[in-house]
Image (tube, rainbow, N blue to C red):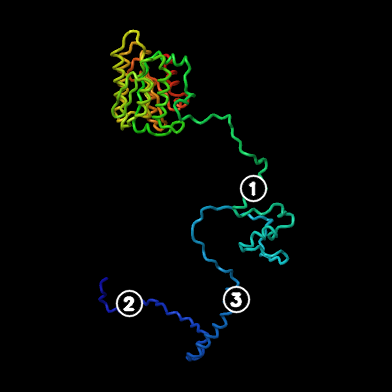
Amino acid sequence: MPLSTTGDPPPPHETRDRPTCAAKPARTRLPFAAIGRNRTVKWLLLLVMLCQLSPALSESQADQPPQTAPLKGGVRKIAPVTEDPGLRIERPVTDSSSPAQYPLHAEQFAGSAVGAAPPGLGSGVNTTALPPFPLHADRFGSYAAQFPPPGLRPQSATIDSSSQPPFPLRADRFSGYALDSNQIQSLAKYDLEIIIDRSLSMRRRDCPGGLSRWEWCGYQAQDIAKALNPFVPNGMTISRFAADFDVHERSSVQQVAAIMEQPDFQRGTRMSLPLESRLDAYFRRHKSGDKPLLIAVITDGRPWPPPEPMIVRDVLVRASQRMQSPDQVKVVFLQIGGDDPRGERFLLDLGSNLTGYGARFQFVQTVTFYELMRIGLARALVYCAQRVG
């Protein structure tokens, strides 16, 4: 705005209303502030007030319930708490009218248990019916005789003479395995050969009568030779095998006994060597009208070393290809000893599944150790010889 050039006085300045300061409120003074500035008086008054407040605080704390420490940990299971209304918890009361306390000394236990009843038992329990159990070993026999168990009566020992006698240990007493005339004649129709295992395991004594495996087979081989002697005057052939083999052709009864008395045990069970040798010998000399061949192989386990089982199987398969009829040749495996389950499975497989390996005829049979112990060596050969097919 332009300034005025006239001599008029400038307009008076407008006056603004300024706020006025409010009056300060009056200061509240403590009760002890009215008393001069004497510090000693002030501290005395403060101490009196604290003494008056301390009883009130103690009474308020007494009225509050006691605080317990919080529980720490986890809760695994929550189950309702049940209370039996018929049970009450009371303090134990000493019954001065009861008998003396039960004795805690070991030397007084026996007398107190029999003479006086323990606290709490009435006179209804009869503690004098039976005498105390004797604690001495030398008095036990008389106690048992005085009070025998119900239903038992002492008797003197008796010998049952009707039971069977023990297994005979002599070769001439194997009457349980003897053959009758018909069985001997059916066995004499074959050209019989025995191939017997002479490995180290044949020394084991697990046959009836405490005999070793070699002894048990040897005694029965002698019985077979004696039984066949009237029908086979030229004798029979015995072959023994282990690491190698030997052949004793046309052996008499005395020669069979001498062969079995000298086993010459060796390591190994190479069964394929004597088996192939005797089969080849039969096919070379065989003529029309000759007796069929019956080979009894007595062994106690699986052939060894490892290639032997496959070689034995191949020997039998090749022999079947040279046979003209299923009854021309029969091979019977007689297992002795029952501690070789692998050997038993091998022999049973040959006796039932040889045609599955390519054989022309199933001409192999197997007799387990259990059956051999039950019927004997001679009868086992008779049953196999009479079997058709």
Residue drawn at (44%, 14%) of the image: 185
Kindly identify the amino acid type of the residue bearing the numbered disc 3.
Glu
Kindly identify the amino acid type of the residue bearing the numbered disc 1.
Ala
C-alpha span from label 1 to label 2:
149 Å
Looking at the rendered structure, the secondary structure element under dot 3 is helix
Circle 1 is placed at which residue position?
144
Residue 274 horizontal/vertical position (percent): 30, 23
Residue 364 visible in the snapshot: yes
Specify whether 73 is left or right of 87: left
Residue 183's disc is none
Residue nearest the viewer, comparing 5 with 304: 304
Among numbered discs 1 and 2, the one appearing first in the sequence: 2
Circle 3 is placed at which residue position?
59
Circle 2 is placed at which residue position?
11
C-alpha span from label 3 to label 2:
80 Å
Query: In the rendered image of this protein, does residue 163 appear above or below residue 75?
Result: above
The answer to which image quadrant residue 345 occupies is top left
Residue 320 horizontal/vertical position (percent): 32, 16
Q: In which quarter of the image is the C terminus?
A: top left
Q: Nearer the viewer, mark 1 or mark 2?
A: 1
Residue 312 horizontal/vertical position (percent): 31, 23
Among numbered discs 1 and 3, the one appearing first in the sequence: 3
Looking at the rendered structure, the secondary structure element under dot 1 is helix
Kindly identify the amino acid type of the residue bearing the numbered disc 2.
Pro
Query: In the rendered image of this protein, does residue 249 appear above or below residue 115?
Result: above
Residue 389 visible in the snapshot: no
**Is the Cβ of the residue at disc 3 closer than 8 Å to that at disc 2?**
no
